[in-house]
Image (cartoon, grey):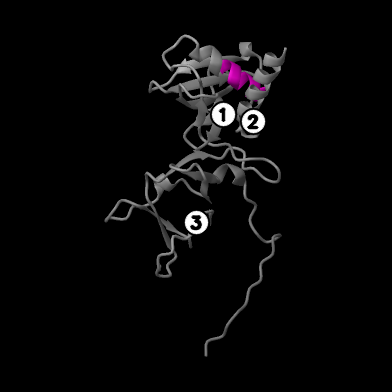
Amino acid sequence: MPKRTTLTFTSEDAPQQQGAAEQLYVYYCKYTGKHAFTIDTDINKLPRRRTDGARIVDTGAHSIKLYTTPGGSKLIRSPLIYILGDAVVTYVNQAVIHGDKVLVPPCIRHHKASGGTEVRLEIEDRVHRPALVKITADHVRIHITSNIAADTTQPEILQMMGKALNARLTNLQLMKGQRSRSRYLIVDHMTPEEVFEKLQASVGRINTQTEQEKKITGRS
């Protein structure tokens, strides 16, 4: 038998990783907005499978942490993972979040021109009650009572978002999006992390606050 040698490495022996946090990429499901996986490389640089163009992740060469649930199919054991290119969206994780911090979805990002934060909104109009509905990777979905084409739309959106962010209206700007039901909200003097935390805390709460205010106004 050939002679075997066992080598033991500790953290002190490992090479120092410079800028490791900047090398992680966070991917979200394009359709649900849920965190799908975190990987140490940009998947756009990975090779493709010829049959369907899926990206090939060699787990022997790359570190990947999956947050998905198996679909029940029987899979052959393999060191390779295949990712369909249009199934996920990503942003480079510039502040990999540890502890009690959060991962900011791509729809909330730094706005270079103002130095503040840009929020991509998706609007459903002529709804009975205004509400901040949900946050996905692609947009923050809101309900408004106004017709999307009415002059009252912008003041209603700004008032709702100002309340959710606890921000002055003078620090908010609303810009048209690529579609009639999309808008871009520019928030001054707030980071994307701060905006996300406040919006996340306000999901489903704006509706309740508005109804309570109506009751108080009616009583007075």
For disc 2, the marked residue is: 205
3D distance between C-alphas at marks 3 and 1? 38 Å
User: Which one is earlier in the sequence, the residue at label 1 or at label 2?
Assistant: 1
Residue 163 among those drawn in magenta: yes
Give the class, few, some or many, for how many residues have Cα within 10 Å of label 2's Cα (few <14, many ≥20).
Answer: some
Which residue extends farthest bottom?
1
The C terminus - image quarter: top right
The one of 77 and 129 positioned closer to us in this rendering = 129
On the image, the x and y values in percent for residue 120 come to 49, 27
Please state which amino acid type lies under the numbered disc 2. Answer: Arg
Image spot of residue 134 (x, y percent) = 54, 35
Q: Nearer the viewer, residue 120 or 208?
A: 208
The image shows residue 29, relative to residue 150, as above or below, that is below
Pick the residue in front: 86 or 94.
86
Residue found 53% across the figure and 17% down from its top: 113
Mark 1, other Cα within 10 Å: few <14 / some 14–19 / many ≥20: many
**Residue 71 colored magenta?**
no
Which residue is label 3 attached to? 62
